[in-house]
Image: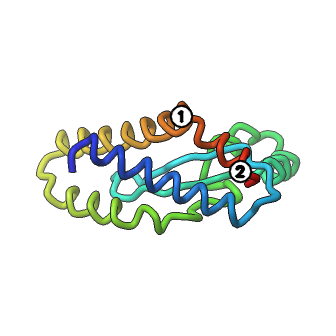
Amino acid sequence: MNAQELHLKIVAATKSAFTQVRARYPNAEFCGYALYSDPDAITICPAANTCSHLEKMIFQDPSDAKYYRWSPGEWDHEFEGSEHFSEISKHLYDEAKKITSPHEHKLFKQKIYECCVDALESIKEEGFLMTLVNLGF
């Protein structure tokens, strides 16, 4: 899978995952959406956070406010919608098994992380997240 094809698949999976989460929690006010991966970049997972969850976490531990804001693993809907990334993650795992050098592995990880950032930037620029809000989610 080339970078452009991977980007398109990540965009599609991201939209599906975030639409699913928004539909499950139509009354929630969301304040964050993210994609994250493991240290080997062989999985991609979505996360979404609600304002109420973020406020609760910061209230309980104000000294770690930045951590709770920017760490998807601490978010309210971390990993929800991950099934939309199953095919992508299987492909990444298969590709990673073919890597034979640390340099190749570094380039592989960089490509995956860049594709995730590019996918999020793409949906933001096209107004996808605002569309979810305007549809009543």
Residue 65 in the image: above or below residue 125: below
Looking at the image, which residue is at 74% across and 42% down? 64
Which quarter shows the C terminus?
A: bottom right
Q: Which mark is residue 60?
A: none
Badge number at residue 135: 2
Q: Quadrant of residue 103?
A: top left
Callout 1 environment at 10 Å: few (<14), some (14 to 19), or many (20+)?
Answer: few
Q: Nearer the viewer, residue 54 or 27?
A: 27
Q: Residues within 10 Å of mark 2 (few under 14, many from 20)?
A: few
Quick check: 50 above or below 67? below
Question: Who's the residue at 35% across and 61% down the image?
Answer: 89
User: Do tag 2 and tag 1 residues touch (Cβ < 8 Å)?
Assistant: no
Disc 2 is placed on an element classified as loop
User: Could you tell me which secondary element the residue under label 1 belongs to?
Assistant: loop
What x and y, as percent, mark residue 46? Answer: 53, 55
Q: Going 71% across and 50% down the picture, which residue do you hit?
A: 135
The colour scheme applied to this rendered structure is rainbow
Three-letter amino acid code at the position of disc 1: Glu
x then y, percent, for residue 125: 54, 31
So how many labels did they put on this image? 2
- If you read the primary sequence from the N terminus, does the residue marked by circle 2 or circle 1 appear first? 1
Where residue 10 appears, x then y in whole percent? 40, 50
| CA separation in Å, label 2 and label 1 | 15 Å
Left or right, 52 with respect to 73, comes to right
Q: Which residue is mark 1?
A: 126
Query: Furthest-top residue in view?
Result: 125
Q: Which of the pair 20/94 is nearer the observer?
A: 20
Left or right, 104 with reference to 38: left
Q: As shown in the figure, which amino acid type bears the numbered disc 2?
A: Leu
Single out the residue that lies furthest toward the right.
59
